[in-house]
Image (cartoon, rainbow, N blue to C red):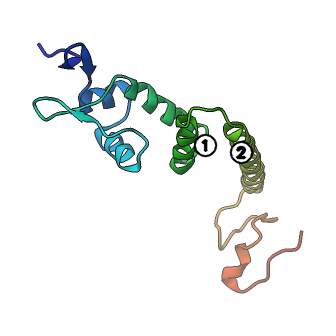
C-alpha cells in the first residue's frame, strides 16, 4: 500500500506531483503550468527522481485558486505572491481588491443592462434577430438585414 506522504530524507516529507494536484483540486497540467510561470517553486527530486513538493504547496495552490475565483488574473496573482514573498506588508492587495470591486460593479451594470434588454425581447415575443415579426420589436438592429434604419428610442 502506497503512503500518502513519502520521505525525501530523514524526517523530510514530500508529495509527488499527482498527490499535490489531487489534494489541491487541480490537474497535473495546471500544477506544471504554475511551476513554469513561477507561481510555485521548482520541486526537489526524490532519490528515485520523482518531483517532490513540500506539503505547503497544496496550501499555496489553494490560495492561488481562491484569488482567481475573486477575479484576479494569474499575472496579478504572481505579482501579489511576489510582494508577499518579500516579507513585508504592503497596501498592494487592498488597492488591487478595491480595483477589482470597481471591475465587478462595472460587470454587474453591464449584465443588468443585458438582462433588461433580454427581458424586453421575451416580453415583446421576438422571434428572430434579423426578421422579427413582433409588433414593437425592441431589438434595435432587427431591420438592418433588410436595409431599414434602427428604431429611435
**Residue lying at 43% horizontally and 42% vertically, measured from the top left:** 39
Instruction: Work out whether residue 9 or residue 81 is closer to the camera in this orientation and state it.
Output: 9
Do tag 2 and tag 1 residues touch (Cβ < 8 Å)?
yes
Q: Is residue 8 above or below residue 127?
A: above
Secondary-structure class at tag 1: loop
Quadrant including the C terminus: bottom right
Secondary-structure class at tag 2: helix
Q: Is residue 55 above or below residue 152?
A: above
- Residue 140 point in image, percent of width and height: 77, 70
**Residue lying at 35% horizontally and 44% vertically, measured from the top left:** 35
Q: Which residue is mark 1?
A: 71
**Residue lying at 32% horizontally and 31% vertically, measured from the top left:** 21
Crowding at mark 2 (Cα within 10 Å: few <14, some 14-19, many 20+): some
Q: Is residue 153 left or right of residue 105?
A: right
Query: Which quadrant of the structure image shows residue 53?
Result: top left
Q: Is residue 81 left or right of residue 31?
A: right
**Residue lying at 43% horizontally and 32% vertically, measured from the top left:** 61
- In whole angstroms, how far apart are the C-alphas of marks 2 and 1? 8 Å
Label for residue 104? 2
Instruction: Work out whether residue 23 or residue 80 is closer to the camera in this orientation and state it.
Output: 80
Amino acid at each position: 500500500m502506497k503512503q500518502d506522504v513519502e520521505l525525501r530524507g530523514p524526517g523530510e516529507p514530500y508529495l509527488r506531483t499527482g498527490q499535490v494536484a489531487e489534494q489541491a483540486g487541480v490537474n497535473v497540467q495546471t500544477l506544471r503550468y504554475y511551476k513554469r510561470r513561477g507561481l510555485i517553486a521548482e520541486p526537489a527530486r526524490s532519490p528515485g527522481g520523482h518531483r517532490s513538493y513540500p506539503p505547503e504547496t497544496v496550501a499555496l495552490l489553494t490560495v492561488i485558486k481562491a484569488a482567481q475565483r475573486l477575479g484576479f488574473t494569474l499575472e496579478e496573482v504572481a505579482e501579489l505572491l511576489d510582494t508577499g514573498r518579500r516579507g513585508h506588508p504592503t497596501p498592494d492587495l487592498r488597492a488591487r481588491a478595491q480595483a477589482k470591486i470597481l471591475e465587478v460593479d462595472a460587470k454587474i451594470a453591464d449584465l443588468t443592462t443585458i438582462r433588461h434588454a433580454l427581458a424586453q425581447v421575451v416580453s415583446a415575443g421576438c422571434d428572430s434577430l434579423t426578421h422579427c415579426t413582433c409588433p414593437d420589436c425592441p431589438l434595435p438592429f432587427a431591420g438592418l438585414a433588410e436595409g431599414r434604419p434602427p428604431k429611435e428610442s
